Image: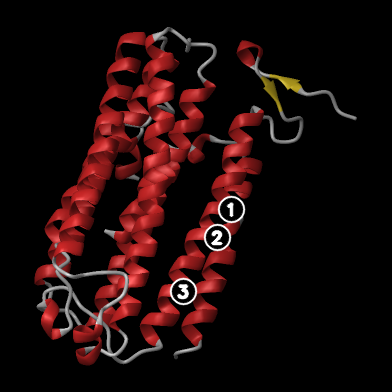
Amino acid sequence: MAMETDMESAEGKKPNYYFIWLVLAVLTAVEVALAYFSGMPRAVLIIVLVGLAVWKATLVAMYYMHLKFERLRLIVLATAPLPLAVILILVVLLEYA
Amino acid sequence: MNEATILSGGVRAEPGMRVYNQKLGMWVFLASEVMFFTSLIGAYIILRFGTDAWALPGIPLEEGGTPLAINLTAFNTFMLICSSVTMVKAFAAIQQGDQKNLRLFLSLTVLLGASFVGIQIVEYMALVREGFLPHCGEHLAALVPNCHLFGSTFYTMTGFHGAHVSIGVLCMIWVTVKAFRGGYTKEDHGGVEVIGLYWHFVDRWGWRWG
């Protein structure tokens, strides 16, 4: 993928940290712009903002926390609570669905 | 019983995970922190959807809104993003044995993190002066029956995050002082990596509140 090529420098596994910073900054600017100017229905806006936040968190975990380059066992350990967190949020949300 | 694996640089590693103990411990701690912050979000959802009235930014406080400034929060979020890149550059520097850039980027990270905490304190003081408290008081309670819930959740969530950042800054100062004393080398820099993991995690959760 083109983005992956940009994020990983020519040295191999070493990510291009400044490019990732730029992507994160742009995504944050998009979030603020959406909050101010989008005019989306509130429910849609929340879903879009959560999606952008998850995208940013994934970038940080993969490249700044180097999970992308860790062994599978550590990746499993690091991501183990995520399904539990999703279940907790979904269960709470379903209370009000 | 398995013998501990020895990684490059003489660092002892957990036999199963093949990472050194401090790093493994930090990941386990961060896993527990995910659930801690998720429980706060769950509490927010319960309170938010459990009431018809909820204070919203952009509406005057006297009409049941909040004086929260999205611009300031966005700026603070941007500072956290910048501190993330300085932190990871510090780690990349010591991986190459570059002491000068290690000290430079760690110092910048401390500066950005401390600025974040400082701005949050100033923001809290301004909010309190404007009457936005963890509880509403009688005049606002009459307008928005459950507005005290908003203040409580706001201060609880941002307060816990601010506390995490503050602890991170204190730890970062410790690591930076050690770096200035030459405490990290190309072969032994686990402390920089471990505090970096914590810092990036705190940054990520900071964006949630942003």
The 10 Å Cα crowd at callout 2, few under 14, some 14 to 19, many 20 or more, is: some
Identity of the residue furthest to the top in this view: B182
Q: Amino acid at mark 3?
A: Ala
- Gap between marks 1 and 3, in whole Å? 17 Å
- Gap between marks 2 and 1, in whole Å? 5 Å
Q: Are marks 2 and 1 in contact (CB under 8 Å)?
A: yes
- The figure's colour scheme reads secondary structure
Image location (x, y in percent) of residue A85: 54, 65
Q: Are marks 3 and 2 on the same chain?
A: yes
Q: Are marks 1 and 3 in contact (CB under 8 Å)?
A: no
Q: Quadrant of residue B82?
A: top left
Residue beneath the point at 41% across and 88% down: B50
Q: Amino acid at mark 2?
A: Met
Image location (x, y in percent) of residue B178: 44, 15
Q: Are marks 1 and 3 on the same chain?
A: yes
Residue beneath the point at 63% across and 47% down: A77
Q: Quadrant of residue B26?
A: top right
In the rendered image, is residue B139 in sight?
Answer: yes
Query: Which quadrant would the C terminus of chain B be assigned to in this image?
Result: bottom left
Q: Secondary structure at mark 3?
A: helix
In front: B129, or B150?
B129
Q: Which residue is mark 1?
A: B32
